[in-house]
Amino acid sequence: MNKLLFGLVLLISSISSAQETPKLVVGIVVDQMRYDYLSRYYDDFGEGGFKKLVDNGFLFRNAHYNYIPTKTGPGHASIYTGTTPSRHGVIGNDWFIPSINRNINCVEDTTAAVVGGISNGSVSPRNVRSTTITDELRLFYNFKSRVVGVSLKDRGAVIPAGHNPTGAYWYDLQSGNMITSTYFAKELPDWVKKYNQEKRPSYFLSQTWSLLKDEAIYNESIEDENPYEQEIRKGMGVSLPYDLSKIKNDPSLLKYTPFTNTMIKEVGIEAIKGENLGQDAIPDFLTLSFSATDDLGHKFGPRSMEVQDTYLRLDQEISELLKFLDETVGEDSYTIFLTADHGATDVPAYMYKNKMPAGYHNNGYLKSTIAEELSKTYGEDKWVSSIINEQVYLNQKLILEKDLNLKEIKEKVIQILLKEDYIYEAFDAELVAQRMFTDPILLKLQNGYDNKRSGDILYILSSSNLNDSWGRQGTDHRTPYTYDTHIPVIFYGAGVRKGSTTRPVSITDIAPTLSMLLNIALPSSATGQPLKEIFE
């Protein structure tokens, strides 16, 4: 009798668990969203977007990136693989390859070609060394699960969608089409073709971008006309409104408008309809990456009215997406997580004016300084092949030809680096490779190091210090400091209880949490842990 009762309990438990497994998971990554945007703009949001996710979902208030550099490619890879660049291999948006003597993009694949557009199609997820949560979902259901990735950026669509998705689609800056590559398909599906035929980018670029709400609402931002912002196009100025119709026949302008996010939402909804996502018992997965927040963040900085307006508009897009999901998939049948791929520093010029620690540097100057100092001892001047991601790649071929001591040269370079005020620490890659650091900042350096792809010397910038090679307005991201690492993590929907916590958690915990929620295997290199609070 006890065995029978025990079996019945197990059966009921399994049925209950199956009922909570979502029909559809929607992963939302907001590019360059600092955590404080959620609290700073909270009172200005509507009831159906960010507020709905926060108030009815589970908010992790102390979530951070646990590696550097904090950039888009590594961010998306870490979210979806559940591990750091040291394991998934995406060590930056780009990195240097000594064998071909040039930098490559994180999703570059010269064997692939564009489908549906003109440019930006030689991409695939081949550089990602781990499976993703989307891969594991496809594998678990023998590829009956449908997975679609959508983003403005190629890396924002390709990496989250995984190695063998139903489809991955991104924006072609030349044609204005949503495109894919031959890695994924020989032609676009009908629903993407139909969306492209509607020429929505042309419509958006005929509009004037004005403030969404009354100007008094924007008291979380500094004055609109200020010296800390870059023009999105020469002659357009740095204050709203922006008449986009003045710039003719330039689809690339769209990425510097909040209407990019409208387009990504629309394509996401079309993907749900076109691929019948969430319409049967086998779970599906839609990945959405909203990038206008990043492109505009770089131009205007975190305290601009343009960035605030973009978030208020994104709030509306999320509200419309949630309403559509409620109506088509069912309120209790889908799960959403929302996070960011990195944060951003305040504009250093603004920080400096307000007596905060900040500054600028120049990689070109740094490279020439190292070359000049080494030439005094060794002759020649081509000792540095590349400086990227705060990593120095030495010209090892030249060092070998000259029969010089590599370790000695690295020590000299480290001393040169440490003379610069804007460089806080510098290390020989061989020391980083031993993985013995315990300091929280240095652990991030260690977690971002890949034995085969990283440089010979790694260094850490001082707080709020940016490369000024592209100007001294606007902002950037890449560092181990909290303005770059502290991001929102929100879970909402099926299988998720309401609540919040200040417990420290890592971005690498998202994929393992989804594995538990979906009852599937973890990504192959996952090092994060399930966020147990949402299940308790």
Image (cartoon, rainbow, N blue to C red):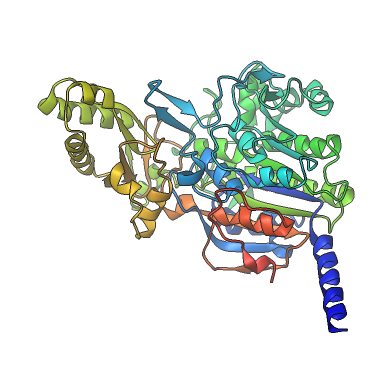
Residue 278 in the image, given as x and y percentages of width and height:
83, 47
Q: Residue furthest left?
A: 377
Q: Which corner quadrant of the image does residue 132 belong to?
A: top right
At x 60% / y 62%, what residue is drawn?
A: 60
Q: Nearer the viewer, residue 420 or 25?
A: 25
Residue 385 in the image, given as x and y percentages of width and height:
31, 25
**Is residue 298 positioned above or below 177 on the image?**
below
Q: Nearer the viewer, residue 408 or 475?
A: 408
At x 47% / y 26%, what residue is drawn?
A: 104
Residue 446 in the image, given as x and y percentages of width and height:
38, 50
Q: Nearer the viewer, residue 441 or 211?
A: 441
Left or right of 200: which side holds 399?
left
At x 65% / y 47%, what residue is drawn?
A: 133
Q: What is the total number of numbered labels drawn onto the structure image?
A: 0
Residue 141 in the image, given as x and y percentages of width and height:
77, 46
Residue 214 in view of the camera: no
Instruction: Name the quadrant of the N terminus.
Output: bottom right
Q: Which corner quadrant of the image does residue 56 belong to?
A: bottom right
Instruction: Name the quadrant of the C terminus.
Output: bottom right
**Is residue 459 positioned above or below 10 on the image?**
above
At x 69% / y 22%, what residue is drawn?
A: 176
Q: Nearer the viewer, residue 176 or 66?
A: 66
Left or right of 23: which side holds 62?
left
Residue 387 in view of the camera: yes
